[in-house]
Amino acid sequence: MKADGRRQLVTMPRVSRRALVPVLVILLALPTPLRAHNYAYHDSMTDLAFQIMLAIAKGDPRFTARPEGVTPAEWTAFLSAVTTAVPRLRRMPTVLPARTSVCIQAVDGGSNTVNSGWSTTSLGKVQHAVASSYLTNTFDCGVGYNYTPGGVYDAINPAGSRDFSGTVLGLWAGRPDDEVDDTHLEIRPTNALGLGFLKDAINDLINKGLAILLIPFVCLVECIFGGCGGCAGDASDLADGANPLDEIDGLIPGIGDISGTDWTGVWHHINLFPQASNEFDNHQGLLSEEAFGGVPDPLEILLMAVSDAAGLSVNPDDSQGVHRYQIADAGDGHPDSKLRDDEDWLITTWVHVPFSPVDNLAQYGWSEFKKDTTRGARFLGWPLHAIGDATVPMHVTATSGWGHRPYEDAYDNLWPKLRRQGEPSEVRFAREALGSAVHWRKLILDWRGAHPKSSTDIPVRELVTAVAQRTFDRSMKLQATLGNWPFNQFMSSTYLVAKDTAIGFYRDRSDAVALGSPAAHDGVGATIAFLVSISEINPWPQQ
């Protein structure tokens, strides 16, 4: 790893450190601030997007009225695309794992039992709502009780002939939070007691020294035989390969295995601060020492101290995220990741390692979807999840603090109010989300126009990054205006000792719904644009 001015020890006043010492044990036992956006948000956002599409496909005039800022030609084309997309999506295989051959679970008030193959079909033939625990609890049939689309959508998608496609898509959208094998950590004695930070700095100095020695020779050869443009970078890569320190360190085994849903979220960030070092991707993901533009909150500082003291480090062999989210040869116009060896991940503790960004997570799922011969719904979960994360201020500023978890919990609580469920303005919310959907659909169509050989492809990294950029710009403007919203440096610490107080800081504001609505519009709108666009691959046979 390179320093490039990035390695700076972050300190805090001695009194603050003493005040937070009792939290050390809590952090080690339950590192909850790292958990990605709550499952319900991804599930509900995706399901609502499908309900809006279904309303358009059924010709409901309340949903076919043109939103503000959309031209008649754009709107006509969009309505046609949505109407065509819905039956195509309904033919997509769920690829849900089967339950046992005998599956008895009372539904509808106990009057019916569940057929064993009820969920292992196409989206449109799923007979019941899918439970949020379907993928994690195999002891029942996986049916979600008491599901309704909610509000005005109960009549548009009525009981008796109800389409449950949105619940399947929502289930897969929440799935990346349960990918516990994405992250495995271990205790590395060679990184404990601050040695990882020191060792990484020494490693950087060695790399820089070797690079300075190699640049004249590498550039001379490259200028003679090709071009000189990348010779400095090539010399740096050669120096990194010639430096034995990290390879030697990699031979020493770590101790233990730490994983779980609290650690999947380290791959679910993107740092859009212009001063981010972006060493391995055009926009890096989580890097604790650069959280929130290089200003970690007290909780993050404490977490860094604990991790450095214990030597808590990434285990790259067992961490699927290392292999999934480094992107090469995507062909979407975004730069590839600078691929890392195992030693780059374990040379120092995890808090000093830049994780791959959430747009790479989206690209992984999209690439796997295109390779999957069934073209089932499973791998769509990654881009759908990334869209949801891109609407969260703390995900786009790459901070696990600054109010991250209480903000997410608050807007989980507020979701029915955000979507205006049962309110007179419910359809107005949908139209505002549709205006956003047209915007994101245009981004996809413009990209396709510039890449005629990819006329049915989707630039998922560009889409996720663009949604994230809008969230970042809006959030920073609000922070400058309001002073402590959406980012508050004390709410993540407060969450550990007074959970409801921290959640209430966000949830109980009189303007909480108004402040959160633009992100909800973008999330639902981008999801609709994505679902419409995937349907144009159309690999699913007529039924």
Image (cartoon, grey):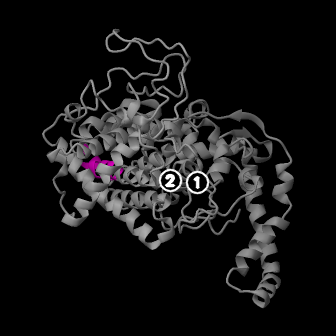
Work out which quarter of the rendered image holds the C terminus and state it.
top left
Mark number displayed over residue 120:
none
Q: Residue at x 29, y 45 (%)?
A: 53
SS category of the residue bearing label 2: loop
Q: Residue at x 16, y 53 (%)?
A: 65
- Spatial CA span between label 2 and label 1: 7 Å
Picture quarter containing residue 283? Answer: bottom right
Query: Decide: marks 2, 1 in contact (CB < 8 A)?
Result: yes
Residue for badge 1 = 287
Residue 384 lies within the magenta run: no
Q: Position of residue 421 (x, y in %)?
A: 22, 36
Q: Which residues are magenta?
A: 513-525
Residue nearer the viewer, 211 or 543: 543
Q: Is 279 placed above or below 381 here?
A: below
341 on left or right of 486: right
Q: Position of residue 39 (x, y in %)?
A: 44, 35
Residue nearer the viewer, 95 or 512: 95
Picture quarter containing residue 212? Answer: bottom right
SS category of the residue bearing label 1: loop
Residue for badge 2 = 398
Residue type at mark 1? Leu
Q: Is 25 placed above or below 274 here?
A: above
Main secondary structure of the magenta stretch: helix
Q: Position of residue 441 (x, y in %)?
A: 35, 60
